[in-house]
Image: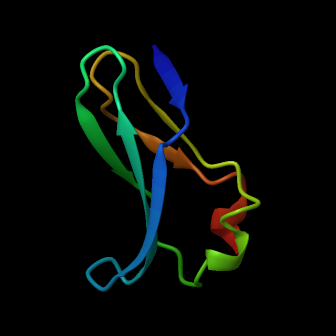
Amino acid sequence: DNLRITPEKLELRFDSYKGGYVIDCYYTAPDTGKKFVFTSEPMPNDPSAYLNSANITVVTNRIDYSNYYVDMDGKDRI
């Protein structure tokens, strides 16, 4: 069973290990207060100009927030 969440905060950075720009999505679980960081797949181009218009959400496992996917609203194909 999956859950779609809206991150509380987004941070863009270049990840030299992954070889591209990634977005860190910060979220606090309302039931436990536990904090999570979900990181997007690397993108070759800087997506800064598109971040405000993107509806970025995270699809994750409802039980333990594992096996997640950062849904970039199509902006990951820039």
- Work out whether residue 49 or residue 59 is closer to the camera in this orientation and state it: 49
Looking at the picture, the colour scheme in use is: rainbow
**Relative height, residue 44 to residue 26 (above, below):** below
Tell me the quadrant of the picture where the N terminus can be found: top left
- Work out whether residue 52 or residue 42 is closer to the camera in this orientation and state it: 52
Residue at 50% of width from left, 22% of height from top? 3
Q: How many marks?
A: 0
Quarter where residue 48 is shown = bottom right
In this picture, residue 61 sits left or right of residue 73: left
**Relative height, residue 52 to residue 47 (above, below):** above
Q: Horizontal and vertical percent for residue 25? A: 43, 51
The answer to whether one can see residue 60 in this image is yes
Q: Horizontal and vertical percent for residue 75? A: 70, 64
In this picture, residue 20 sits left or right of residue 15: right
Q: Horizontal and vertical percent for residue 42? A: 45, 71
Q: Residue furthest right?
A: 53
The answer to whether one can see residue 41 in this image is no
Q: Horizontal and vertical percent for residue 17? A: 26, 81
Residue at 63% of width from left, 54% of height from top? 72
In this picture, residue 45 sits left or right of residue 23: right
Residue at 70% of width from left, 48% of height from top? 55
Quarter where residue 52 is shown = bottom right
Residue at 59% of width from left, 84% of height from top? 45
**Relative height, residue 40 to residue 34 (above, below):** below
Tell me the quadrant of the picture where the C terminus can be found: bottom right
- Work out whether residue 54 or residue 72 is closer to the camera in this orientation and state it: 54
**Relative height, residue 62 to residue 68 (above, below):** above
